[in-house]
Image (tube, rainbow, N blue to C red):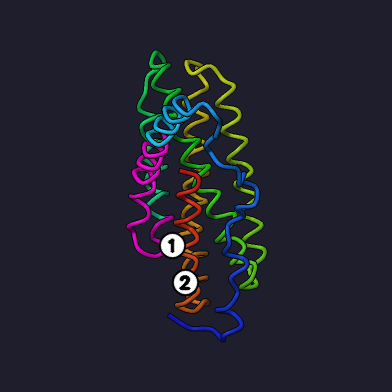
Amino acid sequence: MATRSDNRSTRSSSTRTDSRSRSDKSAFSWGSAGGIVGAAFGGALIAIAANLGRKFAVQGVSAIKGNWADSLAAEHKMVLALFDKMLATDDDQIKQRSFLLMQLGHALDKHAYAEEHVVYPSLRDANWKSDAELLEKEHGEVKTYLHRLHNMEADSPEWVGIVAEFRDNIARHMRMEEDEVFPKLRAEISDELDQRITKEVNKAGFMMA
């Protein structure tokens, strides 16, 4: 892999996820009623442990895939698998379709967050602003498809056709990233920056899991 000069490898601001939008307030509410607070504290710990377990389970598959490009490619495959499950449903499987659509929306939201807050800013720093803008524009189209499906009856005759069209557009977007954009960026940046992007992508994915 080609390495770049120090001024390229030291650019870390573009790979920092924006955590300022999240509240810094404690999740616990302390009070004077010791017994009640203690019970609430214990319940909160259980809830936090369960949430962390869910996050590790959701993030685990992509986080163990090595560098950030491999991790995002693994998420691409998971998303396409969800589409295939959706397309395999029948019109009377309304609950299953709704559940799969919810899973798809969550997976795409998590994935887009990592790309838009870490990878695309790195593309801009590498002077590939047009690629970053095109990919972000296509993320906007993803939101349009999700909005249409969320506002459509799951047993609508048009449902499968829209899901199929959605999948085709997503697959094309993913191929562009995996075959062109990601390899081009990795060839341009230093090993140090490549590792930093990997850490930030994993961090962003864990936040959104």
Q: Where is residue 194 in the image (x, y as percent from the top left)?
A: 47, 71
Amino acid type of the residue tagged 2 in the rendering:
Asp
Q: Position of residue 20 (x, y in %)?
A: 64, 52
- Which residue is depicted at the point 47% across and 82% down? 2
Q: Where is residue 15 in the image (x, y as percent from the top left)?
A: 57, 64
**Pointers 1 and 2 in contact (CB under 8 A)?**
yes
Let me know if residue 65 is in the magenta part: yes
Give, as a single range, the part of the protein colored magenta. 47-72
The residues bearing labels 1 and 2 have C-alpha atoms spaced at a distance of 8 Å
Q: What residue is disc 1 on?
A: 68
Q: Residue 194 carries which label?
A: 2
Q: Is mark 2 on a helix, strand or loop?
A: helix
Which picture quadrant has residue 149? Answer: top right
Q: Residue furthest top?
A: 92
Let me know if residue 26 is in the magenta part: no
Which picture quadrant has residue 38? Answer: top left
Amino acid type of the residue tagged 1 in the rendering:
Trp
